[in-house]
Image: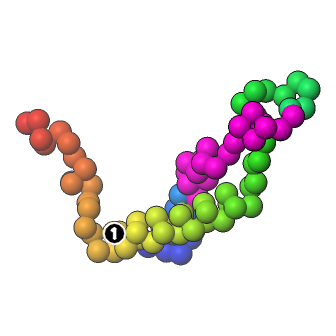
Amino acid sequence: MSWTSVVAIYFLFWVMCAFLLLPFGVKTHEELGEEKVPGQADSAPANFRPGPLMLRATVLAAIVTALYVWNYSARWIGIEDLDVTRWFA
């Protein structure tokens, strides 16, 4: 696998991990006991911090990408293992 493929796969995993981690650790103004800005939605986050989110997504994406590349080179799980139609035949 070329390094450009690994970078592309890492980017895809990073975006997926960032969206997966978005709801964790975020609290609303009501939960923190703070005032809302007029016109703000009740569900708007009061403590959104993109820095730690990006750091956690970077670490998680690096781990998932390493496992993916390791599986690609060792061939533990292949496409034939994911074929569920053979279970019903």
Decide: few, some or many residues near mark 1? Use Cα within 10 Å; few <14, some 14-19, many ≥20: few
Residue that numbered label 1 is attached to: 71
- Residue 39 vertical placement versus 84 (above, below): above
| 81 drawn magenta | no
Q: Residue at x 25, y 67 (%)?
A: 76
Q: Nearer the viewer, residue 10 or 17?
A: 17
Residue at far right of view? 38
- Residue 6 vertical placement versus 44 (above, below): below
- SS label for mark 1: helix
**Can residue 5 be seen at all in this image of the molecule?**
no
Indicate the position of residue 56 as horizontal and vertical percent values: 61, 63
Q: Nearer the viewer, residue 15 or 32?
A: 32
Q: How many discs appear? A: 1
Indicate the position of residue 36 as horizontal and vertical percent values: 86, 32
Q: Residue at x 21, y 54 (%)?
A: 81
At label 1, which amino acid type do we have?
A: Asn
Q: Give the quarter of the figure containing the C terminus.
A: top left
- The magenta-colored residue range is 14-35
Is residue 2 found left or right of 41 in the rendered image?
left
Q: Residue at x 53, y 69 (%)?
A: 62
